[in-house]
Every structure is written in structure tokens, then in C-alpha cells.
Image (cartoon, grey):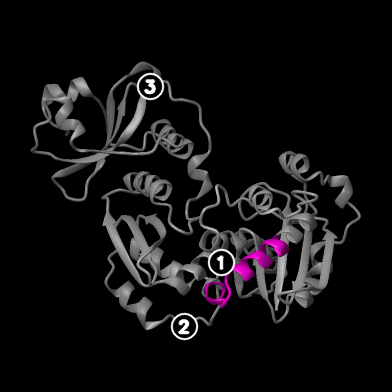
Amino acid sequence: MYTIVDLETTGGKFNEESIIEVAAYRFDGSRIKDQFISLVNPQKDIHPYVEKLTGISSKMVKTAPKFHEVAKRILEITSDSILVAHNAQFDYRILQLEFKRLGYDFLMKSICTVILSQELLPDQESYKLGRLSRSLGIPLKDRHRASGDALATVELFKILMEKDIKQEIIKKSIVEFPGESISSVFKNTIEKLDNNTGVFYIYNKNKKLIYIDFSKDIKNKVIKLFTSKKFIPKYVQNNFKTLKVHLTGNINIAILKALHEIKTLKPKINNNVDPKIFHKTEKPDILNELNDFILTFNGTKEDEKSFIYFKSQKLVGYGYFNLFNNINSEDKLHSRVVKVDRSERLINFVHKLIFEKKYKKLLTLKEIYKKSNIE
């Protein structure tokens, strides 16, 4: 038995959101057996963007039941079933958040139809619900309302079940929530790790990259990943086979490298990045004043420096230099640079670095060529 769920929330700061509408359809694989749809009074303001997107206003939810008044019905309709949602990590996180406020630990097996669609419908241009529905001929009424989106997800899930004749891929996609104990495989992996700074990569049993993350303390981050009850960590736990590590020497290069590789390598699942890192900032004045320069940071060894390189006021990439290397030309500098994708997130991140002066030194290329090294 499955329960297909969609939630609309107030928006706002991460983990401070509240539900404003819930739709849940209990589904046996062929028919809807039960349903629950309700507006919810969040007892806080709805973000203007959400009001515009959903059409749900504060006035509409003023007389709606509060979450604690619908919590029992949600538990009833989801009992002894697998939660299914499009981008399930969002809906699951919000349900956990709301129930945690009531002192209840909400745990369910879950399936994400985004991930499942990527497996069973590999040639789609987009896996957003609206575009996927249009591509597959799924009727989608009341877009960005819980009921409309949940019903479209029911129809999508039917198609996915038909595609997966033996139900093998669907079974493998179920994120399970076992007890607190940590498996011997995880323990052996953790024991091999050190408390270093860098990027780590997780692969599944088919040797496919499924997750990339970064940390100042990789060992501690991996322990949290292997013991968390949240949706994405559980997905990683259930599909884990091997872990690889790349040390960077400092967290800023780790973030830059991870963001670039998440964009280019497209691991199956990633939500690891704190959105605070990417708050949009104005272009720093220094980018209008200088053309070619680098920001320096610690390297992976005492006699090494890492750097982020800007050319013609634009981010190019990052690299490493041994302190004893001569750098007397642009060619030598370029030979050390790993180019990165200039996504909006990366641009916001490096702008923030410059504003907050989170680097060792800022050096123009003229200064570097004159000294022939990076100090």
C-alpha cells in the first residue's frame, strides 16, 4: 500500500516552514482507496512568493485547522504504507518537522518519484512535475496546489509501476528507516576516515556516483550521514557501497570543488549544501577594480597553497601551487587551474568569500609574476 502526498508550505527560512495545505491519497497500486485534503492554519505569515505561486492567502487559512488538529488523520491515512512524493525529501522533511514540533518521531518508508523517473524514464528533458506531466500526457489541474500535484503524482506513479514490470527498481528505490544500530559496513568505512577537510563521494552497488558532499571534518560528517533518519541520508545508507575522499586543505576549495562536480557529474541525489552559502550578494567592488587576480588559501601540505583564479573579473577555477614552484607566466598558472562551471550558486559563493575576506591573500597576476611564486 502507498500514500501519495503533496504539501504546500509557508516558505521562508529552511526548517522554519509550516504546512498550509496537505493532500494524501492512499493507493493500492491500481486504485485510490482513501484520501485526505485540507488547508492548514500555519499560525504564521505566508511568504508573498508562495501566495502568488499557490494562490493560498493568509485569509484562506485563517479558519483552517491547525496542524495538531489534522495530525491524527495524516497518521491514519499513511499507516502501514509507503510514502510516495515528487521530490520526497522535501515532503518527508516537512512532515518530520511538523510532527517533531508535537513531540512525535515521524518515520515512514518512502519513494521519490523524481529519482524513480530518472531510472525508468531516462530520456526526459526535465523531471519537474509540470514538464514531466505534459511530456507523458498526465492531466495536471490546480498546479502548485496540494491536491492537483498529488493526483498528478498518482498518475505518474502508475506509469512508473507499468514500466517496472517486475517491480525490482521500485523496490530498490524504497528508502527504509531501520533502527539506530549502525551496520558493520558503515563502521569499517568510518574507521578508515580521518578528521580532514575535503570532498567525499558515495557510490552504489553498480559503482554509480549517487552523492557528493564536503566538510571541514569528513569523518564526523560521514558519521552523521550514516546515522541520520532524514530522507536523503537514508537513501544514501540504503544504496551505499563505497566511499572515496579528496582532501582539499580548506573548506572554501572543498565547497567550490563540490559545487562544480555536483553540477557536472550529476550525482543521483544531493541536497547537502546549506542555502545560506548562496544568498545573493552584490558584485564586490574589487571585481570592478581588478581584472586578473587570485585569492589564496591553505593547501593540503605546509609547503602548498591553494587558490581561486579570476580572469577579466570572472571566476575561472581553482588550483594548487607548491611554494617552491616558479610562476612567471600565464601558461604556468593556467596549467595548474581546474576550471569550474560558473553557475549562479558558485558566483554568489565567491562573491560572499570576497565580501567577508575569507582568504589568506588577494594577489594580482602582476604581483605573482614579479615574485615568481605564491606566498
Q: Which residues are magenta?
A: 153-171
What amino acid is at disc 3?
Ile
Q: Residues within 10 Å of mark 3 (few under 14, many from 20)?
A: few
**First in sequence: mark 2 vs mark 1:** 2
**Farthest-out residue, top:** 289
Above or below, 21 against 71 in this view is above
Q: Secondary structure at mark 3?
A: helix
Quadrant of the drawing holding the C terminus: top left
Percent x, y for residue 256? Answer: 36, 44
Q: Please tell me the numbered disc located at residue 231.
A: 1
Q: Main secondary structure of the magenta part?
A: helix
Q: Are marks 2 and 3 in contact (CB under 8 Å)?
A: no
Q: CA distance from mark 2 to mark 3?
A: 51 Å
The answer for how far apart the CA atoms under marks 2 and 1 are is 17 Å
Q: Residue placed at 28% from the left, 22% from the top?
A: 292
Looking at the image, how many numbered discs can be counted on the residues?
A: 3
Amino acid at circle 1: Phe
**Disc 1 to disc 3, C-alpha distance:** 41 Å
Is disc 2 placed on a helix, strand or loop? Answer: loop
Residue corresponding to mark 2: 181
Taking depth in this image into account, of 125 and 102 the one nearest to the observer is 125
User: Which residue position holds label 3?
Assistant: 286
Residue drawn where x is 73% and y is 44% of the image: 50
Residue 52 against residue 241 in the figure, above or below: above
- Determine whether the residue tagged by mark 1 lies in a helix, strand or loop: helix
